[in-house]
Image: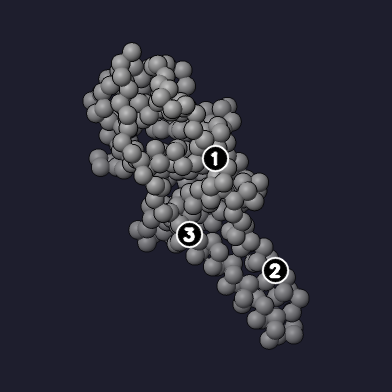
Amino acid sequence: MKELRVPALSGPLPDERGLAFLLVRRGVPLALAGISFLAAALHAAGRGWWMLAGVGALAAAWPSFLRGQAFLRNRAAIMRQDSLWANALVPLARRLGLEDAWILAFCGYNNERVRQAFAGRRAKRALILLPHCIQMSRCKAGILDDLQACYDCGLCPVGDYMNAALLNRWEGRITNRSHKAYREAREYRPDLVVAVSCTDRLLKGLTKMPEIPCYVIPLILPHGMCVDTDFSVPHLFAAMETLVEARRPPGDVQPLRREGIA
């Protein structure tokens, strides 16, 4: 068996708070609640309706305060509401030329909450989802079926991911369609998904799989969409090492295997 390359140290997870999304998600309902209660105090006519509007606005803001295990228990409902806010403002952000920045703010907000949720109890069953476009366009290896050729290549992120996955017994899938990635995640039933994709697909994934905690990492697109894309490999390693319970005993190295990787 060839010797596995030991990946470089990953370092800590980057600080992703998604302040722009949090400002809108929490700030707008709280501002509306304040206006409604002020109107109820100043106007006797329709006071009950103003109070009701204020309570409704507070209820809309409340999910943004949930953290940790409370967030995990109510994740599906919380993510459905958060996704409504994110998707509703995408057209406005696109007009302002800030679509990617807005989606990344939503992703950062999500990542921070997932990070807090798994701070005390790491995930035991995690799944990595990677897009096939991280493969070099001139490469002929069939990474959707067999990663043997990528084992000691190292010319694109697939080789780094594969060595780390084998060393740490991580489960991962490389797919070429979003619906296949969703199907893989639902069939595997993980405690946590660590997904890499372009920004619009990350938003779509968080919207379509609200029931599964997802830590998301955006693709880097030096040559445009779907061609020779890249991503921060240390970021992926840091996410797995920080959020997922270690599965590899010290000094234990697994032989190359096909199942569970491609």
Q: Residue at x 41, y 59 (%)?
A: 93
Earlier in the chain: of badge 3 and badge 1, it is 3
Q: Which residue is mark 1?
A: 122
- Tell me residue 99's x, y (percent): 39, 54
Q: CA distance from mark 2 to mark 1?
A: 36 Å
- In the image, residue 27 above or below residue 229: below
Q: Residue at x 53, y 47 (%)?
A: 119
Q: Residue at x 45, y 57 (%)?
A: 18
- Tell me residue 158's x, y (percent): 33, 28
Q: CA distance from mark 3 to mark 2?
A: 22 Å
Q: Secondary structure at mark 1?
A: loop
Q: Is residue 86 left or right of residue 66?
A: left
Q: Please tell me whether mark 3 or mark 1 is closer to you in this view.
A: 1
- Tell me residue 100's x, y (percent): 38, 52
Q: Secondary structure at mark 3?
A: helix
Q: Depth check: 88 or 101 in front?
A: 101
Residue 101: image tag: none
Q: Residue at x 50, y 29 (%)?
A: 247
Q: Which residue is mark 3?
A: 21
Q: Is residue 207 visible?
A: no
